[in-house]
Amino acid sequence: RKEVEQDPGPFNVPEGATVAFNCTYSNSASQSFFWYRQDCRKEPKLLMSVYSSGNEDGRFTAQLNRASQYISLLIRDSKLSDSATYLCVYYGGSQGNLIFGKGTKLSVKP
Amino acid sequence: GAVVSQHPSWVICKSGTSVKIECRSLDFQATTMFWYRQFPKQSLMLMATSNEGSKATYEQGVEKDKFLINHASLTLSTLTVTSAHPEDSSFYICSASRLASLQKETQYFGPGTRLLVL
């Protein structure tokens, strides 16, 4: 089983749509989870951390289900500027490093 | 906020040459720096972890004699790709962390270096 699995997409949605991304992870011991955003040919940037209780930041909502080892990201009222690749990430490496998924590509169209 | 720079941002070189990439933490001291590599449409893969003043720890499958890492100060780590070949062409990204306990600490990423070996 891959360490982090994500649907690669692409997800093509119109502006204003609600879109959800899912991710499963293999390391049940991991304590910290994140969603990162990566624009084409750029470094990844932290979008938000993910907590068991779920957390919301504006139009973005993240959820963690430890029992199912599953993380989700919901984007409401999507904007053109949301077009990017969304990476599911967690601390899981032996060196305290981040483990990255391949990402899910989102394209928001006018 | 914490800023990490990388230099150069892109490099084109001939096969067989060596390329040095610098990663600097500009406004904080980085106890640990990580070097990642990303091939097109692939995830970021950790190459090595570098702690200031000690030898880097390499991930399985990464040749330590080919990818030389030096972390001589708390603000600078370098990655040297020795005798580069076309298959080394990739996007190299460093990240830096301030604390020894990494679970709760955000890693700050550099902007990446795009390497093309002809």
Image: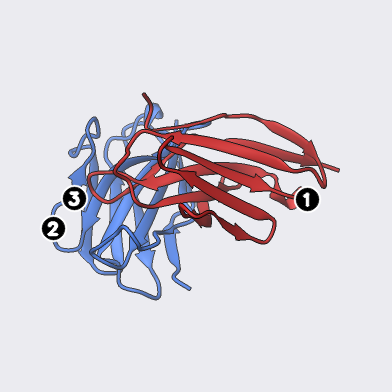
Which residue is located at x 23 percent, y 54 percent? B50
Image quarter of the C terminus of chain A: top right
Which structural element holds mark 2?
loop
Which chain is rendered red in the image? Answer: A
Q: Colour of chain B?
A: blue
The answer to whether mark 3 and mark 2 are in CB contact below 8 A is yes
Q: Mark 1 sits on what residue?
A: A77
**Amino acid under label 3?**
Ala
Q: Mark 2 sits on what residue?
A: B54
Q: Pinpoint the chain carrying mark 2.
A: B
Residue A33 coordinates in the image, percent (x, y): 43, 50
Which residue is located at x 60 percent, y 58 percent? A56
Which residue is located at x 38 percent, y 56 percent? B95
Asked where in the image residue A86 lies, by quadrant, the reply is top right
Q: Real-space Cα distance between discs 1 and 3?
A: 45 Å
Q: Real-space Cα distance between discs 1 and 2?
A: 48 Å
Q: Pinpoint the chain carrying mark 3.
A: B
Extreme residue in the top direction: A1
